[in-house]
Image (cartoon, rainbow, N blue to C red):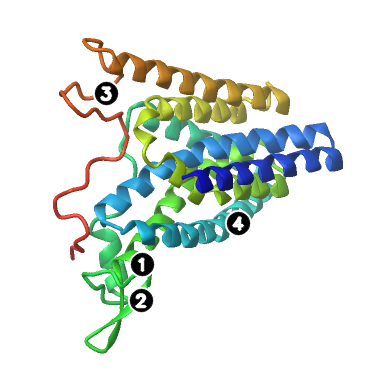
Amino acid sequence: MSRAVLVSAAWVGAGVGFGLVLTLWQGADAGQQYFAAYVLEKALSVDNLFVFAMLFQAFAVPAASQHRVLLAGVAGALVLRGGFIAAGAAVLSHLSWAFYAFGGILLVAALRMARGGERPDPSRGLIQRGLRKALPISDDYDGSAFLTRRDGRRAATPLLAVLVAIETTDLVFAIDSIPAAFGVTTDVFIVFTSNAFAILGLRALYTVLAGALERFTYLRQGMAVMLAFIGAKMLLSPVLHLPAAVSLGAIVAIIAAAAGLSTLARRRVAAPGEAAGPGEAAAPGRRRAPGGPSPAPNDAGRIHA
């Protein structure tokens, strides 16, 4: 754990250091745009950790193999997001109305989060069926290998199914996060680098926060407010221009408010006789925050057709 904390802190330091270099290189406005996009993407990426935990539980992924699949997942996410960003920039440069369409997408995403919609769960059925069309899937893990041999034939291990599920989930999240970054800045270089530094430390961050994810009671509400703010900013851009510094301050304030409310909610839950946070079960014993990872199902780790 101590090593994971140091690695996570190092990645955050690298992201902040890059922002400072960018500020000296391209000026204060570019630096403010980068930090606003970086903080936004870092906050949104925390939602990925809930899905990671859910997938690892559903597939009963051994702890020794989790780091490898996370490393491969982060590498794949960089490539996929790079493609998304390039495509988004091309669309924005050729279609003037696309900027407002992105704003509308963010408002819909904010409404979905505010209503407490379920996080995407590609762990069951669909991923396996799609993967089975290319390769048979073995029922058992083979160490940290993604491929193995079954009856003399090459087959995918459940770990490969988890990796495909993680990449599929990141595509779903990118539909929200990439337009949000473009809502802060249309500079493709800043959008990509802020995304890159936000997700590069996800593997270490998961190790640090895996046991404490359920404490983020108001995470989704905070993200809903952030997405709504960026979406409204994009839609109102013809009549209202907000400097990058204002966007950065608003994003930081929203995150701080969500963290503070989550802390207060956990303290109330810990006190005997107090009411639970919004959506929390009041059953005795173990409590779970809304949207947090569910207990592993009884048939975890089995691959269903």
Query: Can residue 259 be seen at all in this image of the molecule?
Result: yes
Determine whether label 2 and label 1 are within 8 Å by CB: yes
Looking at the rendered structure, which numbered label has been put on residue 221? none
Circle 3 sits on which residue? Answer: 279
Task: Give the residue type at disc 4.
Answer: Gly
Q: Going from the N terminus, do you reach mark 3 or mark 1 first?
A: 1
Task: Give the residue type at disc 3.
Answer: Gly
Residue 13 x/y as whole percent: 67, 41
Considering the numbered disc 3 on the image, is that residue within a helix, a strand or a loop?
loop
Circle 4 sits on which residue? Answer: 82
- Asked if residue 151 is positioned above or below residue 220 in the image, the reply reads below
Closer to the camera in the image, 132 or 53 = 53
Q: CA distance from mark 4 to mark 3?
A: 36 Å
Q: Nearer the viewer, mark 3 or mark 2?
A: 2
Q: Nearer the viewer, mark 4 or mark 2?
A: 2
Task: Give the residue type at disc 2.
Answer: Leu
Residue 7 x/y as whole percent: 57, 48
Q: CA distance from mark 2 to mark 1?
A: 7 Å
Determine whether label 3 and label 1 are within 8 Å by CB: no
Determine whether label 3 and label 2 are within 8 Å by CB: no
Looking at the rendered structure, which numbered label has been put on residue 147? 2
Looking at the rendered structure, which numbered label has been put on residue 160? 1
Toward which corner of the image does residue 213 lie, by quadrant?
top left
Q: Going from the N terminus, do you reach mark 3 or mark 2 first?
A: 2
Query: Can residue 97 be seen at all in this image of the molecule?
Result: no
